[in-house]
Image (tube, grey):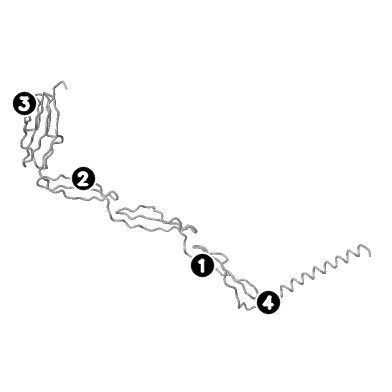
Amino acid sequence: MKNSDMRLKTAGVGRFLFILAILSVVLMAAAGVQAEEACTHEEWSDWTVKWEPDCASKGTEMRYCLKCEIEEERELPPTGEHEWGGGWYLVKAVTCGAAGKETRTCNVCDKTESRIIPATGKHKYGAWQVQKAPTLKKTGVKVRWCKGCGKKQTGILPIAKPYAKFTKKTYTVKVGKKLKLLPKVQVAGGDVIKKWTSSKPAVATINYKGVVTAKAVGTTKITFVTKTGKKATCKVKVTSKKK
């Protein structure tokens, strides 16, 4: 047999096998279609989650026919349940008079949620300050402010009780000099000094205006009496001019 005849024979066999393979595939596919058309899909597997839904995105679940193994899918709706991470974050502090604000963010969809913190209504006041000092006949006024919102609160100071005192117990002055004691005394509002006296006029004298005149080295006691009868005493030490 010639080589050319052999090649023709071999090519013919190859074409026959190729056509046979195609026919087999077609027949198998047709058989499968007929099987599917014949299946009523009465028995299914349980649904299995294929893609988990989250707070904002849909998911998918699937099942298959236990007879023909055809698959079926359906969507799962978003859960709507956000995964809040890190808790609430304060963005505006609450005070006694103003509400505050907090926010939090979902770790999955970045949705931000806010909530309002009601004002506390509890003021934090500073120390009282005298706005108007009381006198022997009239009450006074005191004020203070809230440290949080600046709210002003006013209070009443009771009528003053008579008192008399010096700012210091002892004062020093040189011989021949003068010392004004009036700015160094304290009495109740509305009260006045009625009398000044010096226990040793030879050392120092004092006039009705409360001015001390130093005369000699030594120590004297200066006393004043108010109109209400209160009195106070201090020491005045007179030193040499050389000191």
On screen, residue 93 versus residue 84, left or right, reads left
User: Residue 212 location, x and y as percent?
Assistant: 10, 29
The answer for how far apart the CA atoms under marks 4 and 2 are is 98 Å
On screen, residue 46 versus residue 136, left or right, reads right
Q: Which mark is residue 77?
A: 1
Residue drawn where x is 21% and y is 45% of the image? 129
Mark 3 or mark 4: whose residue is earlier in sequence: 4
User: Residue 142 location, x and y as percent?
Assistant: 19, 47
List the residue tagged with mark 4.
35
Residue drawn where x is 65% and y is 78% of the image? 39
Check disc 4 and give the amino acid type: Ala
- Disc 2 versus disc 3: nearer the observer: 3
Check disc 1 and give the amino acid type: Pro
On screen, residue 62 versus residue 102, left or right, reads right
Check disc 2 and give the amino acid type: Gln
Depth check: give the residue in front, 15 or 49: 49
**CB atoms at circles 4 and 2 under 8 Å apart?**
no
List the residue tagged with mark 3.
202
List the residue tagged with mark 2.
129
